[in-house]
Image (cartoon, rainbow, N blue to C red):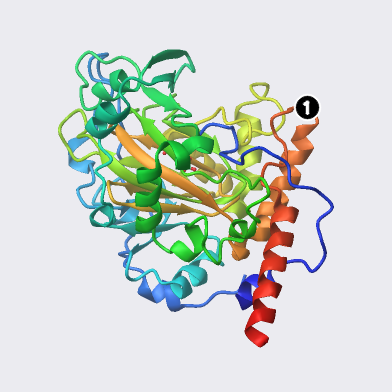
Amino acid sequence: MESLLAALPATPPNTEPSPGGIGKANGEAAGPSSSAGASAATTVKTPDTETSLNMTRTSLDSPVQPEPSTFPSGSATSAQTLSGTSSIPCHQARIFTDAELTDEVFQSIWTLGEPIVVTNLCPKFRIEWTPDYFRHKYGNQSCLILECQTDQNKRVTVGEFFSWFGKYEGRRDCWKLKDWPPSTDFKSAFPELYDDFAQATPVPNYVRRDGVFNIASHFPSNTVAPDLGPKMYNAMASYEAENSKGSTRLHMDMADAVNIMLYAASTPDGRPGCAAWDLFRSEDSPKLRKFLRRKFKGQYTNDPIHSQQFYLDSKLRQELYDEFGVKSYRIYQRPGDAVFIPAGCAHQVCNLADCIKVASDFVSPENIDRCEMLTREFREQNQSMAWKEDVLQLRTMMWFAWLSCTRQEKDIMS
Ligand SMILES: O=C(O)CCC(=O)C(=O)O
């Protein structure tokens, strides 16, 4: 509680709560250090280079073809723990088990602004979040799907979408479910999934809607709190070859987030499925922007990261390193792996198989400054893009957290 109070303003915000959800930045999917966490991490220290997982579209029938010798076989593989030979340098993400990641350990890493991986969460989930589960329970619902490469969209049933999972033969496209279920509805529409996620998430004091270190948890019940999810990412396999757009293009969210993979089909060549993440340190954003501006001149409006139009394939990541010395944290996320994404870290994802993930936003005291900066950035863009409103209501959020903390402090003292 003390650390939460220290992070909050003692003056009320000048904005009133407004309806609307934070969701992700595109409405679709958007300090001092302690060594405690570092010593608890189980990451293997090996050379800082990505393992090559180049996926080439060898035929229209087989959209993804991993290079067999370099495909990861372990869980939550940070690129450097693999035996491959690609030379794109990358940072190492720290990897923990759920039991190792106490609030104190989490805080010590989180203040550094680094992503974190937690492995082996599947046994904590009571529901099997599989394509069959969604087909049987919600198969008749209509939903919108989006083609990752072309942005073409069409309407299908949830049953149809999930019936394609794991069937690569003859597949030409990479579809993802768009806004299903709408994140505002998640708790009421899927109470059993909502509860399952809440009881299984690592560091619940930070992540859960009622988590004491989640600054967003202090909104009074008679106000409209921002929508922090959870939301699902259901998408088919994409590929990493040149010009790929991946599954989710480079973007930056306004809040912290945790993303847990619940299911991955096998890859088209029968290997365990995973998703390849690239997360960039928030302090590298200016260089990243400079690179993108140069590379994609005239192809976006306003901000090249917030425009969410680009995916950095391996060629571009190599160029980014050669020209600016910027590396990503490369993480291969498998079922049962949670990836923690600090607010303000640009990131992109490429599913190497058909995957089901669930993600939730939260606002940690450690990252308030970054959230504030992002809110300002989004507000500046707001002048030309109406959808970038102050969905996080950060000042209001901090004010309610301050009130709630001082009230509790008084109760303790009396
Ligand atoms: O899994 C994905 O495709 C994207 C996930 C993501 O960007 C997030 O959780 O913030």
- Whether ligand 1 has any atom under 8 Å from the Cβ at mark 1 is answered as no
- In the displayed structure, 310 sits above or below 124; it is above
Q: Nearer the viewer, residue 246 or 363?
A: 363
Q: Quadrant of the C terminus?
A: bottom right
Q: Is residue 141 left or right of residue 205?
A: left
- In the displayed structure, 395 sits above or below 227; it is below
Q: How many marks?
A: 1
Residue drawn at x 55%, y 74% as measured from the top left: 33
Q: Quadrant of residue 111?
A: bottom right
- In the displayed structure, 320 sits above or below 342; it is above
Q: Is residue 322 left or right of residue 5?
A: left
- Residue 65: image x %, image y %? 24, 28
Within 10 Å of the Cα at label 1, are there few (<14), some (14-19), or many (20+) other Cα atoms? few
Q: Could you tell me if residue 132 is visible in this image?
A: yes
Q: Nearer the viewer, residue 367 or 217?
A: 217
Q: Quadrant of the N terminus?
A: bottom right
Q: Is residue 269 left or right of residue 258?
A: left
Mark 1 falls on what kind of element? loop
- Residue 60: image x %, image y %? 27, 13
Q: Could you tell me if residue 49 is visible in this image?
A: no
- Residue 37: image x %, image y %? 43, 73
Residue drawn at x 38%, y 50% as measured from the top left: 195
Q: Nearer the viewer, residue 72 or 353?
A: 353
- In the displayed structure, 63 sits above or below 108; it is above
- For mark 1, what is the residue? 384
Please name the amino acid that badge 1 sits on.
Ser
